[in-house]
Image: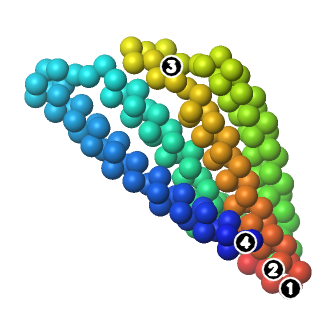
Amino acid sequence: MLRLIDATSEWVGKIFSYLLIAIMLLTSMEVVLRYVFSRPTSWSGDISLQLSGAVGLLAGTYTLLHHGHVGVDSLYKRLPGKGKILADGVSWACFFLFTGVLLWKGGQSAWTSVINRERQFSVLAPPLYPIKILLVAAIVLLLLQGTAEFTRFLISLRRGETN
């Protein structure tokens, strides 16, 4: 199960990283249209914003898989074995509390957005509910990856291993 969660996080991270190319091309196109041809689009900003949101939301799971989140290593490395275990335990408690609240409130927001068919206030007025649904999916993936990492933490504790 842990390998399946890891593979899903890896796959989602790699697939959605290609949106960065689309964002780069879209932004480059807008710059050329605006400054070379004096013909800016009214829609590229909205599309870039939504694509960037998708990448940002789904990058968290991939980052957690590869242990890329910022930590306070200067303090953590100085802690004795039991201190590190305590710090990890507190970190995991905060992680699950934060992502649980995020899922709860994000789910409410997504549901309201779908029911109201919420749209962005702009010229293009793209729908906002797809990005809010993606938010909920990203949080679920983050919780799954966090559960996998927490399970590994518990296994290492049981074996008597410390960082």
Q: Which mark identifies residue 37?
A: none
The answer to whether marks 3 and 4 mark residues whose Cβ atoms lie closer than 8 Å is no
Of the image marks 3 and 4, the number of the one nearer the N terminus: 4
Residue identified by numbered label 3: 120
Quarter of the rendering containing residue 152: bottom right
Of the image marks 3 and 2, the number of the one nearer the N terminus: 3
Q: What amino acid is labelled 1 in the image? A: Arg
Q: Position of residue 153 (x, y in %)?
A: 79, 72
Residue identified by numbered label 1: 159
Of the image marks 2 and 4, the number of the one nearer the N terminus: 4
Q: Quadrant of the C terminus?
A: bottom right
Above or below: residue 39 compared with residue 64: above
Above or below: residue 154 compared with residue 94: below
Q: Nearer the viewer, mark 2 or mark 4?
A: 4
- Estimate the spatial distance between the alpha carbons at disc 3 and disc 2, rounded to whole Å: 46 Å
- Estimate the spatial distance between the alpha carbons at disc 1 and disc 2, rounded to whole Å: 5 Å
Residue identified by numbered label 4: 2
Residue drawn at (89%, 81%) of the image: 158
Residue identified by numbered label 2: 156
Residue drawn at (27%, 43%) of the image: 25
Is any part of residue 107 visible from this angle? yes
Q: Position of residue 125 (x, y in %)?
A: 45, 18
The answer to whether marks 1 and 2 mark residues whose Cβ atoms lie closer than 8 Å is yes
- Estimate the spatial distance between the alpha carbons at disc 3 and disc 1, rounded to whole Å: 51 Å
Q: Nearer the viewer, mark 1 or mark 4?
A: 4
Q: What amino acid is labelled 2 in the image? A: Ser
Of the image marks 1 and 4, the number of the one nearer the N terminus: 4
Residue drawn at (86%, 85%) of the image: 159
Quarter of the rendering containing residue 28: top left
Above or below: residue 148 compared with residue 140: below
